[in-house]
Image (cartoon, rainbow, N blue to C red):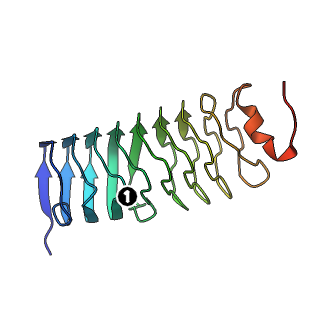
Amino acid sequence: MSTEYLFDQNFSDITFLEHDIKYKEYENCTFTNCDFTSSFFVAVAFIDCNFINCNFKGTKINHVSLRNVWFTKCDFTSVNFAMTDQIIYEFHFKDSLLDYAQFYSLKLKKMQFINCSMIAVDFMESDLTEALFDNCNLRHAVFIGTTANKTDFSTSYDFIIDPEKNKLKRAVFSRDNVAGLLKKYDLLIK
């Protein structure tokens, strides 16, 4: 099947159906107020694209290439990113809902999460080296076997990260959120 190439286009207020997005390559495109909940992402590439106020809640994302992509005010509740293309990729989230999303065993180096709700997100076995978690709610997020060297958690909150089960060399924390590193010791910090 041949791939359809779309360049420098704006998509607004569209509900994409199951087959609308398959086997396409989008470059320098903007998606605003679009609904992808009925879509099935297969062999899709997004290059230099922006998604604004889009709904991906529960969407199946398989074999998707994300290269310099920003998601702003998007809902990714319960989305599994495990099948995203890991060869050449770069994607970031701002003001987005990522509750219950799964990033299991992904390389997410230098990824940016800005003002995101990330309740119960799975980062097990992921590489978050030099990632930024700026003002993110990480309540019940799973960090086991995670590499978070030089990762900035300084403005994020409500997380529990066991330094003995994760790599945290030169990770950045604030005095206000360091208690999340000591939770397993059942200490009272004043």
**What secondary structure is found at the residue carrying circle 1?**
loop
* Residue sitting at x 41%, y 42%: 92
**In this figure, what is the number of numbered marks?**
1
66 or 183: which is nearer to us?
183
Q: Is residue 93 left or right of residue 8?
A: right
Q: Residue 133: x percent and y percent? A: 55, 36
Residue 86 lies in quadrant? bottom left
10 or 172: which is nearer to us?
10
Q: Eyeballing the image, is 110 above or below 95? A: below
Q: What's the residue type where badge 1 is placed?
A: Gly
Q: Is residue 116 left or right of residue 56?
A: right
* Residue sitting at x 34%, y 41%: 74
Q: Is residue 14 left or right of residue 113?
A: left
Q: Eyeballing the image, is 19 above or below 111? A: below
Badge 1, how many Cα within 10 Å: few under 14, some, many 20+? some
Quadrant occupied by the C terminus: top right
* Residue sitting at x 57%, y 48%: 128
Q: Eyeballing the image, is 190 above or below 127? A: above
Most extreme residue toward the bottom is 1
Q: Residue 44: x percent and y percent? A: 25, 61
Question: Where is mark 1, residue-wise?
Answer: 58
* Residue sitting at x 47%, y 32%: 115
Q: Residue 1: x percent and y percent? A: 15, 75
